[in-house]
Image (cartoon, grey):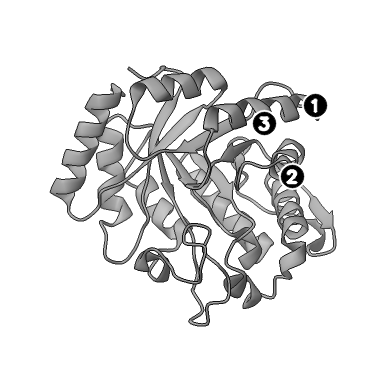
Amino acid sequence: MVDQDVRVGIVQFTSDRGLPPQVLAPLIERAGFASYFVPEHGHIPTRRDAAHPGTGTSELPDDRYLRTLDPWTALAAAAAVTTTIELATAVALPVQADPITLAKTIATVDHLSRGRVAFGVGFGWNLDELADHGVPPARRRTMLREYVAAMRALWRDDEASYEGEFVSFGPSWAWPKPPGPVPVLLGAGASEKNFAWIARHADGWITTPQDRGIGEAARRLAQVWREHGRDGAPRIVALDGRPDPERLARWGEAGVTDVLYPAVDSSEEAAAGHLDGLAGVLSVR
């Protein structure tokens, strides 16, 4: 049985070929899972210079990269047919959008879902995709930091403003405000540089499929968190494949707060069967 302090969620690699979010999300909620995560890729340039972190080459491991649904439209559809599950991204690519418009979109989904949104963000591995949005590769970490800070100001302040290298706007009104703070989770590899970025600018970490030694990494992030004077503990969302209750218990002891499993979305029947089986193995009900 999984440590009850570890929340178990589902991540769907959305596409126009899989189950729509408004069909899958209620199945996830009914099976007793805590969260529903979706990715983002606005487009994939046919010229492939950037190496995929999984293949190590320009080859993509899945054609769903070409067919990914817009995450916020997908999560809004899920919000309309669920009441309890968290609605999150793993991960969104904020620097490919206008931060003021994106802040409004996320605040609206969070408002309509009554505070169920979590904002998983990434720097972006696909430099070809980033280039089409005018993102300088060497500055994307700074750009993401500014976007997050500016969006938080819009969510928090009655008269919000921000002045930075990539984002700048004067005192402004912007409602709705999210019902509470929107958790910001960085999806990135387990490195000292990334852990320092999390401790300074985010609320937690989403692992990558390439990460190993999750327990050790979780402990190190908690240490970096404390070294930066942060109270409490970071939220740590681990991607997993095959469920292993004993491993998840060890992860929970190390500080992992959430574990995500990939959805089966070929049909409603297949999805429901997979979710019920997974829930039984992990005793999530």
Q: Amino acid at mark 1?
A: Glu
Tell me if residue 208 comes above or below residue 172 in the rendering: above
Question: Which residue position is annotated with label 2?
Answer: 193
Residue 181 bears which disc, if any? none
Tell me where residue 59 appears, x and y as whole percent: 45, 70
Q: Is there CB contact under 8 Å for labels 1 and 2?
A: no
Instruction: Report the residue that reaches farthest toward the left.
Output: 269
**Residue 85 seen in the figure:** no
Tell me where residue 28 appears, x and y as whole percent: 29, 39
61, 131: nearer the viewer: 61
**Label 1, residues with CA under 10 Å away: few <14, some 14-19, many ≥20:** few
**Label 3, residues with CA under 10 Å away: few <14, some 14-19, many ≥20:** many
Secondary structure beneath label 1: helix
Q: Amino acid at mark 2?
A: Lys
Write the residue at 31% across / 66% down.
Answer: 16
Question: Which residue position is annotated with label 3?
Answer: 221
Secondary structure beneath label 3: helix
Question: Which residue position is annotated with label 1?
Answer: 227
Tell me where residue 224 appears, x and y as whole percent: 74, 30
